[in-house]
Amino acid sequence: MPPVAEAPSASAQARLVIQAEALAWLSDNAADPLDAVITSLPDVSELPGLGGLDAWKAWFIDAAARVMSWPATGMPSLFYQSDIRYQGAWLDKSYLVQKAAERVGAQLSFHKIVCRRPPGSLSQGRASYSHLLAFTLGAPLTPKKPSADVLPDMGDMPWSRAMGTSACQAACRFLLDETSARRVVDPFCGRGTVLAVANALGLDALGIELSAKRCRFARNMTYPTTTDSSSRARGES
């Protein structure tokens, strides 16, 4: 199926959502100089056709490496990943992302922990925290405005696999404070939470998503420009 694009949403910042396979699209399209990536790679449960855990791990590391290699030198790629238990064994996705970084020679700019539940909470199956990691090719990007290493609240989740809105804000503010990035690219954009928060904070956004249904939501997802802990991104619940 050829990529299907729709005009940007009617907002102050441009938004484009393209229906395509993410890694093929990255291979076929060069990054603009002011593009930065914020994304979350699919979990093993989302890609059953790969044939099991080992095949998914190999895919995940390759995908992360290709994402990191896509932006211009010095422009960051940020990953939001949640650890899981798989058949009783703990799966550390930050380790897999860092394996990808070693493969392509990317430098780690920060590694934050995002609390999905209050500290001290017990969880079954999925960790009560997520990782937020930033990588660049070339010289490491040392933040001029350091921010907290632990985010106490991930924010709202407009759908079950969403990146928390507070984590989205932290990622976008890093780009605004520390880089010249003017467009956020999410190659696995789902229903568009990252895109909506990026637009609300003054950044253009480009999302790639294979699912036509998710693309429709991603084109229409909104997030208020003034937010507090009770504000919610609006889209499919």
Image (tube, rainbow, N blue to C red):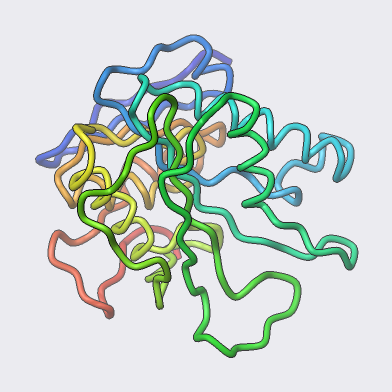
Q: Answer with left or right where residue 28 lies relative to residue 173.
A: right
Q: In front here: 77 or 158?
A: 77
Eyeballing the image, is 76 above or below 20? Answer: below
> Dividing the image into 4 quarters, which one contains the C terminus?
bottom left
Q: Answer with left or right where residue 119 lies relative to residue 230.
A: right
Q: Tell me which residue sits at (28%, 48%) in the image.
A: 143
Count the labels in the image.
Answer: 0
Q: Tell me which residue sits at (50%, 52%) in the image.
A: 80
User: Can residue 22 be seen in the rendering of this structure?
Assistant: no
Instruction: Indicate the quadrant where residue 102 lies.
Output: top right
Q: Residue furthest left?
A: 12
Q: Answer with left or right where residue 207 lies relative to residue 230.
A: right
Q: Answer with left or right where residue 91 lies relative to residue 73.
A: right
> Dividing the image into 4 quarters, which one contains the N terminus?
top right
User: Can residue 18 be seen in the rendering of this structure?
Assistant: yes
Residue 151: give x, y in percent of width and height: 39, 71
Instruction: Indicate the quadrant where residue 134 lies.
Output: top left
Q: Tell me which residue sits at (75%, 48%) in the image.
A: 44
Residue 165: give x, y in percent of width and height: 35, 62
Eyeballing the image, is 53 above or below 50? Answer: below
Q: In front here: 86 or 146?
A: 146
Q: In front here: 232 or 42?
A: 42
Q: Tell me which residue sits at (48%, 57%) in the image.
A: 162
Eyeballing the image, is 124 above or below 13? Answer: below
Residue 142: give x, y in percent of width and height: 31, 44
Residue 196: give x, y in percent of width and height: 29, 49
